[in-house]
Amino acid sequence: MPLVNMKPVLREAQKQGYAVAAFNLVDYGTTKAMIKAAEELAAPVIVQVSAKTIKYYSHKEIVSWVRVLAEDSPSPVVLHLDHCKDIEMIRKCAESGWTSIMIDASELPFEKNLELSKQVQEIADKHGVGLEAELGQILGVEDDMVVSEDEGSRLTEPEDAERFTRELDLAAFAAAVGTAHGYYKGEPKVGFDRIREINSRTGVPMALHGGTGLDEQTIARCIAGGCAKINISTNLKHVFVESFTGFHRDNPKDFEPLHLIDAQYQACKALFKSKIAEFGGSGRAAEVIAKAA
């Protein structure tokens, strides 16, 4: 089916009490694996892309992969631009068929962040795509952005979130609630009360960044608090590399590239299926399609 806007997908997930898995693609193979995983589970999925990945391939090349794969699948697929600060890149993605964009101006003061987010809202509205914006700064490393506790990271205040989302028409709201990009060093300090209060004040589906490394109980509590989109990137990177090198280690005389590529594909698809199921997305495709139509 055609690519779908993220807004109705996440609204339905929030209403029904589950979260849609959002995976950062690495290449065509991982894109195919995540859409096939969603298809096999009759689930919606968000294919998202970092700015550096777009710079490597190009926005046109990526949308061509995803559009063709989505058209042959009965599952609802969103193509989402993740953590972008470049307005021109945002504009090009929206113009070329992406169905969701994220402006990350979270390092700016509140008013500047809101002003820039409103500019991107105009782009999203013009092209009929969903918008995600971030308030507060999420710890860890994402793309080439590094945020540490010693360098001014800040949690999202519920009252600020309420005002921010009231001024915008968001498909997803990214808030800093104690999670972090990358693997956790020690026990993550997730602010469950903060998640619940932000969601009760805003009513906007929350995007939980830093999903890699959170245990099932933590994920379940975040979803119960109103998180409707959960991002997985670092976990995929490790499976992508380790499955390829692992196959070669176990089969040192096999130099048929398709064997290595298939081993990598199957490992990535298994990861995607496990996360989609864990987040509650299995069997949700039909109801999402009905709402998105």
Image: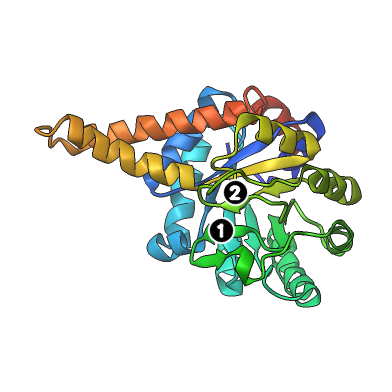
Q: Is residue 138 visible?
A: yes
The residue under the point 56% across, 62% down is 93
The residue under the point 70% across, 68% down is 120
Kindly report the distance in space between the C-alpha atoms of the residues bearing marks 1 and 2: 8 Å
Q: Relative to 58, is 104 on the left or the right?
A: right
**Label 2, on which residue?**
210
Q: Position of residue 136 (x, y in %)?
A: 73, 63
Q: Which one is in front, 99 or 30?
A: 30
Q: Residues within 10 Å of mark 1 (few under 14, many from 20)?
A: some
Tag 1–tag 2 contact (CB < 8 Å):
yes
Residue 230, quarter of the rendered image: top right
**Label 1, on which residue?**
140
Q: Residues within 10 Å of mark 2 (few under 14, many from 20)?
A: many
The residue under the point 47% across, 42% down is 235
Q: Position of residue 285 (x, y in %)?
A: 65, 28
Relative vertical location of residue 20 with respect to residue 273 in this rendering, above or below: below
Relative vertical location of residue 267 with respect to residue 166 in this rendering, above or below: above
Mark earlier in primary sequence (1, 2): 1
Q: Residue furthest front?
A: 186
Amino acid carrying label 2: it is Gly
Query: Which quadrant is home to the N terminus?
Result: top right
Q: Relative to 131, is 85 on the left or the right?
A: left
Q: Position of residue 19 (x, y in %)?
A: 68, 36
Q: Residue furthest left?
A: 253
Q: Is residue 29 visible?
A: no
Relative vertical location of residue 217 with respect to residue 162 in this rendering, above or below: above
